[in-house]
Amino acid sequence: MRRPAPLPAPARPAPRPSAAGGASSPGVDGTDETGRDAAARVVALAGGAAPDGDRPAGGEHAGVADATGPAVGAGAGAGLDAGAGAGSVADDGIVGMRDVWRAARARRRALRAEVRRFTGRQRRRRAIWICVAVAFAVLIAGSFGVAYSPLFAVQRISVVGAHSLKAAAVEHALASQLGTPLPLVDDAAVKAALVRFPLVETYTLQARPPHELVVRIVERTPVGVVTGPAGYTLVDAAGVALSTTATAPEGEPVLTVTGGVDSDAFRSTGLVIRSLPSDLRALVTAVSASTPDDVTLTLGKTGSKVMWGGEDDSGRKVLVLKALMKRYPPAKTGLYDVSSPDAVLVK
């Protein structure tokens, strides 16, 4: 048999320039020696061991020779510890672990600074709102504390609107409120004190800081007196008894009304008397009524009668009566009938 011909040898790759500027020769296995040296250098920088066959001789602390620089030791004896070796940057651009750690720390610092910058405005705004809320709460609490303190206690009571009543009597009745802070004045106690005065129809309280309490009252308007077993009782238009005396009070007409103070005739009589002007009312000495539509007035010492009728058109009746009295004086006239203002009668 014929022996087979040997295969041709593989072509060697062209040599590549090394880091020092020269040509590098491939290794036995076809690997560029410069690449092998670079791989060994990376392993040494990372703190590991070189691959088998590429581990440098000379023992545990042997260095790796760089084409462009001195040998770098794999251990502490070479002048750099493991951390320094891992963090250094090789001349051929390989990034070490120290650079990674530095970049991570710088990124964390930048992130914390950005978070602080972003949240700083919110913290300032929150602090401002908290300060405003605290100041407002302190202001409200202080206002309430001062208002309800003895600094605003009642030291003087003033009564306004008293004519028939004596203001001193009303002030004495409300003396229990002296020393009480103005916001704590007891309305129920004031009402109970003023109920004892029948002439008081309505009242209002006004606090006048720092120490004055003003009581404004509206007195009932008396319309006349009614006779009874106890004497003469002064009443208003609603029939409320204001006072009782043994003799008829001066300036008040005597009322004679069928059905008493709870009747419709009395209600009509009260409205008629309240519609009279003061000068005309001063002449009235007596009023009588049996129904709401036959109110009759008695004028002065002459005893002249005025047939008024009901409370309707009272304003017009006043004008007509004044004109009649001027033309026909009461001393010479016994009767004025103005129950119908359009058809008057004088006797």
Image: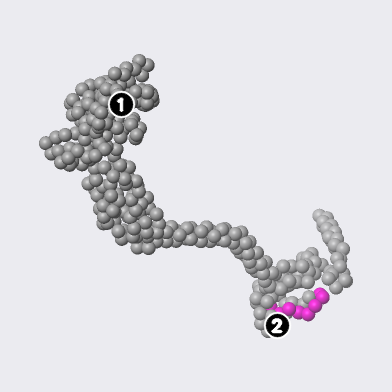
In this rendering, the answer to whether 138 lies above or below 247 is: below
231 in magenta: no
Instruction: Give x and y (percent) for residue 7.
Output: 83, 58
How is the rendered protein coloured? Answer: one colour
- Tell me which residue sits at (35%, 63%) in the image: 150
Q: Tag 2: residue type?
A: Ala
Mark 2 touches mark 1? (CB < 8 Å):
no
Query: Where residue 151 appears, x then y in whole percent?
Result: 37, 63
Residue positioned 70% across, 82% down in the render: 78
Residue on which disc 1 sits? 330
> For the residues marked 2 and 1, what is the alpha-carbon distance in whole angstroms?
145 Å
In the image, residue 307 lies at what x, y percent? Answer: 28, 22
Classed neighbour count for the residue bearing mark 1: other residues with Cα under 10 Å, few (<14), some (14–19), many (≥20): some
Provide the secondary structure element on which disc 2 rests: helix
The extreme front residue here reads: 332
For this view, does 118 lie left or right of residue 316? right
The amino acid at mark 1 is: Pro
Residue 195 lies, in percent from the top left, at 24, 45
- Quarter of the figure that contains the N terminus: bottom right
Residue 239 visible in the shown view: no
Which labelled disc corresponds to residue 78?
Answer: 2
Q: Residue sitting at 51 percent across and 61 percent down?
A: 131
Residue 70, by quadrant, is bottom right
Q: Provide the secondary structure element on which disc 1 rests.
A: helix
Q: Is residue 211 left or right of residue 236?
A: right
Question: Looking at the image, is mark 2 or mark 1 nearer the viewer?
Answer: 1
Magenta-highlighted residues: 67-74
The residue under the point 53% across, 61% down is: 127
Q: Is residue 70 magenta?
A: yes
| Residue nearer the viewer, 177 or 7 | 177
Disc with the residue nearer the chain's start (2 vs 1): 2
Could you tell me what secondary structure mostly forms the magenta stretch?
Answer: loop
